[in-house]
Image (tube, rainbow, N blue to C red):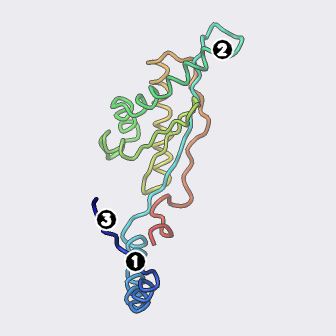
Amino acid sequence: MKEQNTLEIDVLQLFRALWKRKLVILLVAIITSSVAFTYSTFVIKPEFTSTTRIYVVNRNQGEKSGLTNQDLQAGTYLVKDYREIILSQDVLEEVVSDLKLDLTPKGLANKIKVTVPVDTRIVSVSVNDRVPEEASRIANSLREVAAQKIISITRVSDVTTLEEARPAISPSSPNIKRNI
Protein backbone atom coordinates (compact mmCIF):
# COMPACT_ATOMS: atom_id res chain seq x y z
CA MET A 1 0.00 0.00 0.00
CA LYS A 2 1.07 3.52 -0.67
CA GLU A 3 1.78 5.77 2.20
CA GLN A 4 0.11 9.13 2.07
CA ASN A 5 2.21 12.08 3.02
CA THR A 6 0.06 14.40 5.03
CA LEU A 7 0.91 17.82 6.22
CA GLU A 8 -0.59 18.95 9.45
CA ILE A 9 -1.13 22.66 9.95
CA ASP A 10 -1.33 24.09 13.40
CA VAL A 11 -3.74 27.01 13.13
CA LEU A 12 -2.62 28.53 16.42
CA GLN A 13 1.00 28.50 15.24
CA LEU A 14 -0.06 30.13 11.97
CA PHE A 15 -1.83 32.95 13.82
CA ARG A 16 1.23 33.48 16.02
CA ALA A 17 3.46 33.81 12.93
CA LEU A 18 1.07 36.33 11.40
CA TRP A 19 0.81 38.26 14.66
CA LYS A 20 4.61 38.59 14.83
CA ARG A 21 4.57 40.23 11.40
CA LYS A 22 1.47 42.35 11.95
CA LEU A 23 3.35 45.61 11.43
CA VAL A 24 4.71 44.52 8.04
CA ILE A 25 1.28 43.24 6.97
CA LEU A 26 -0.39 46.50 8.04
CA LEU A 27 2.27 48.61 6.31
CA VAL A 28 1.91 46.66 3.04
CA ALA A 29 -1.89 47.03 3.19
CA ILE A 30 -1.67 50.80 3.77
CA ILE A 31 0.87 51.32 0.97
CA THR A 32 -1.13 49.19 -1.48
CA SER A 33 -4.36 51.04 -0.66
CA SER A 34 -2.63 54.41 -1.04
CA VAL A 35 -1.22 53.48 -4.44
CA ALA A 36 -4.62 52.17 -5.60
CA PHE A 37 -6.37 55.34 -4.38
CA THR A 38 -3.82 57.64 -6.04
CA TYR A 39 -3.96 55.71 -9.31
CA SER A 40 -7.78 55.63 -9.34
CA THR A 41 -8.13 59.29 -8.45
CA PHE A 42 -5.38 61.01 -10.41
CA VAL A 43 -4.19 58.72 -13.21
CA ILE A 44 -7.34 57.06 -14.56
CA LYS A 45 -9.55 59.53 -16.36
CA PRO A 46 -13.25 59.16 -15.53
CA GLU A 47 -15.59 57.66 -18.12
CA PHE A 48 -19.32 58.19 -18.37
CA THR A 49 -21.89 55.75 -19.72
CA SER A 50 -25.11 56.69 -21.50
CA THR A 51 -27.66 54.05 -22.42
CA THR A 52 -30.51 54.08 -24.90
CA ARG A 53 -33.02 51.27 -25.34
CA ILE A 54 -35.11 50.21 -28.29
CA TYR A 55 -38.05 47.85 -28.63
CA VAL A 56 -38.36 46.00 -31.91
CA VAL A 57 -41.76 44.79 -33.12
CA ASN A 58 -41.99 42.25 -35.94
CA ARG A 59 -45.54 42.57 -37.23
CA ASN A 60 -47.26 42.57 -40.59
CA GLN A 61 -48.39 46.06 -41.45
CA GLY A 62 -51.68 44.79 -42.88
CA GLU A 63 -52.69 43.24 -39.57
CA LYS A 64 -54.47 45.48 -37.15
CA SER A 65 -55.43 42.89 -34.57
CA GLY A 66 -52.23 43.22 -32.56
CA LEU A 67 -49.23 40.98 -32.06
CA THR A 68 -49.51 37.28 -32.73
CA ASN A 69 -47.62 34.54 -30.96
CA GLN A 70 -45.57 34.05 -34.12
CA ASP A 71 -44.57 37.74 -34.04
CA LEU A 72 -43.39 37.40 -30.46
CA GLN A 73 -41.31 34.29 -31.17
CA ALA A 74 -39.74 35.76 -34.30
CA GLY A 75 -38.88 38.95 -32.44
CA THR A 76 -37.13 37.01 -29.70
CA TYR A 77 -34.92 35.22 -32.22
CA LEU A 78 -34.14 38.37 -34.19
CA VAL A 79 -32.77 40.51 -31.36
CA LYS A 80 -29.38 38.82 -31.73
CA ASP A 81 -29.43 39.87 -35.37
CA TYR A 82 -30.20 43.42 -34.28
CA ARG A 83 -27.13 43.41 -32.05
CA GLU A 84 -24.96 42.52 -35.04
CA ILE A 85 -26.63 45.16 -37.20
CA ILE A 86 -26.00 47.83 -34.56
CA LEU A 87 -22.30 46.94 -34.46
CA SER A 88 -22.01 46.63 -38.25
CA GLN A 89 -19.41 48.63 -40.15
CA ASP A 90 -22.08 50.51 -42.17
CA VAL A 91 -23.92 51.73 -39.07
CA LEU A 92 -20.72 52.74 -37.29
CA GLU A 93 -19.38 54.58 -40.35
CA GLU A 94 -22.62 56.52 -40.70
CA VAL A 95 -22.58 57.55 -37.01
CA VAL A 96 -18.93 58.65 -37.27
CA SER A 97 -19.78 60.63 -40.41
CA ASP A 98 -23.00 62.19 -39.05
CA LEU A 99 -21.41 63.33 -35.80
CA LYS A 100 -18.04 64.18 -37.38
CA LEU A 101 -16.26 62.10 -34.75
CA ASP A 102 -12.50 61.91 -34.63
CA LEU A 103 -12.73 58.12 -34.42
CA THR A 104 -12.56 55.13 -36.69
CA PRO A 105 -15.58 52.82 -36.80
CA LYS A 106 -13.48 50.24 -34.92
CA GLY A 107 -12.61 52.84 -32.28
CA LEU A 108 -16.30 53.66 -31.93
CA ALA A 109 -17.16 49.97 -31.64
CA ASN A 110 -14.80 49.73 -28.64
CA LYS A 111 -16.90 52.36 -26.85
CA ILE A 112 -20.19 50.54 -27.46
CA LYS A 113 -21.80 47.74 -25.50
CA VAL A 114 -24.99 46.16 -26.84
CA THR A 115 -26.98 43.96 -24.47
CA VAL A 116 -30.14 41.99 -24.98
CA PRO A 117 -31.85 40.90 -21.75
CA VAL A 118 -32.90 37.25 -21.87
CA ASP A 119 -36.39 36.55 -23.24
CA THR A 120 -37.06 40.14 -24.32
CA ARG A 121 -37.12 42.07 -27.57
CA ILE A 122 -35.49 45.06 -25.95
CA VAL A 123 -32.00 46.05 -27.05
CA SER A 124 -29.88 48.27 -24.80
CA VAL A 125 -27.07 50.27 -26.37
CA SER A 126 -24.52 51.77 -23.97
CA VAL A 127 -21.73 54.14 -24.96
CA ASN A 128 -18.70 55.03 -22.82
CA ASP A 129 -16.92 58.34 -23.25
CA ARG A 130 -14.91 60.79 -21.16
CA VAL A 131 -17.51 63.51 -21.87
CA PRO A 132 -21.04 62.62 -20.68
CA GLU A 133 -22.78 64.76 -23.32
CA GLU A 134 -20.75 63.10 -26.07
CA ALA A 135 -21.65 59.62 -24.79
CA SER A 136 -25.37 60.43 -24.94
CA ARG A 137 -25.04 62.12 -28.34
CA ILE A 138 -23.29 59.05 -29.79
CA ALA A 139 -25.80 56.64 -28.21
CA ASN A 140 -28.81 58.54 -29.57
CA SER A 141 -27.31 58.84 -33.05
CA LEU A 142 -26.42 55.15 -33.04
CA ARG A 143 -29.99 54.30 -32.05
CA GLU A 144 -31.46 56.37 -34.89
CA VAL A 145 -29.11 55.01 -37.57
CA ALA A 146 -29.45 51.43 -36.34
CA ALA A 147 -33.27 51.69 -36.24
CA GLN A 148 -33.35 52.69 -39.92
CA LYS A 149 -30.93 49.90 -40.81
CA ILE A 150 -32.88 47.29 -38.83
CA ILE A 151 -36.14 48.25 -40.57
CA SER A 152 -34.55 48.16 -44.03
CA ILE A 153 -32.68 44.87 -43.55
CA THR A 154 -35.10 42.77 -41.52
CA ARG A 155 -38.32 44.38 -42.77
CA VAL A 156 -39.74 44.72 -39.27
CA SER A 157 -42.61 47.13 -38.97
CA ASP A 158 -41.45 49.19 -36.03
CA VAL A 159 -38.40 50.06 -33.95
CA THR A 160 -39.62 52.06 -30.98
CA THR A 161 -37.42 54.18 -28.76
CA LEU A 162 -38.03 52.91 -25.27
CA GLU A 163 -35.53 55.21 -23.60
CA GLU A 164 -33.34 58.02 -24.93
CA ALA A 165 -29.77 58.31 -23.74
CA ARG A 166 -29.14 61.10 -21.27
CA PRO A 167 -25.79 62.48 -20.13
CA ALA A 168 -24.59 60.65 -17.03
CA ILE A 169 -24.27 62.68 -13.85
CA SER A 170 -21.56 60.57 -12.23
CA PRO A 171 -18.73 58.61 -13.83
CA SER A 172 -19.18 54.89 -14.43
CA SER A 173 -15.46 54.29 -14.00
CA PRO A 174 -13.16 54.26 -12.19
CA ASN A 175 -14.90 52.88 -9.14
CA ILE A 176 -12.58 54.18 -6.42
CA LYS A 177 -14.22 52.21 -3.60
CA ARG A 178 -13.86 48.95 -5.52
CA ASN A 179 -10.27 49.70 -6.57
CA ILE A 180 -9.13 50.30 -3.02
Residue 158 percent location from the top left of the image: 58, 21
Horizontally, residue 59 falls left or right of residue 82, namely right
Q: Which residue lies under the disc numbered 2?
A: 68
Residue 19 percent location from the top left of the image: 44, 90
In percent of the image, x 51 and y 47: which residue is there?
A: 136
| Position of 27 relative to 88 (above/below) | below
Horizontally, residue 124 falls left or right of residue 45, namely right
Residue 148 percent location from the top left of the image: 48, 25
| Position of 57 relative to 98 (above/below) | above
Task: Give neighbour class at mark 3: few <14, some 14-19, many 20+ (Cα, 10 Å).
Answer: few
**Number of the front mark, 3 or 2:** 3
Quadrant where the N terminus lies? bottom left
Quadrant where the C terminus lies? bottom left
Local secondary structure at mark 3 = loop
Distance between mark 1 and mark 3 Cα atoms: 16 Å
Q: Which residue lies under the disc numbered 3?
A: 4
Could you say which is closer to the camera, residue 120 or residue 109? 120
Distance between mark 3 and mark 2 Cα atoms: 67 Å
Q: Which residue lies under the disc numbered 1?
A: 9
| Position of 86 relative to 62 (above/below) | below
In percent of the image, x 57 and y 26: which residue is there?
A: 56
Q: For the residue marked with disc 1, what is the amino acid?
A: Ile
**Number of the front mark, 1 or 3:** 3
In percent of the image, x 31 and y 65: which residue is there?
A: 4
Distance between mark 2 and mark 1 Cα atoms: 66 Å
Q: Earlier in the sequence, mark 3 or mark 2?
A: 3
Could you say which is closer to the camera, residue 95 or residue 170? 170
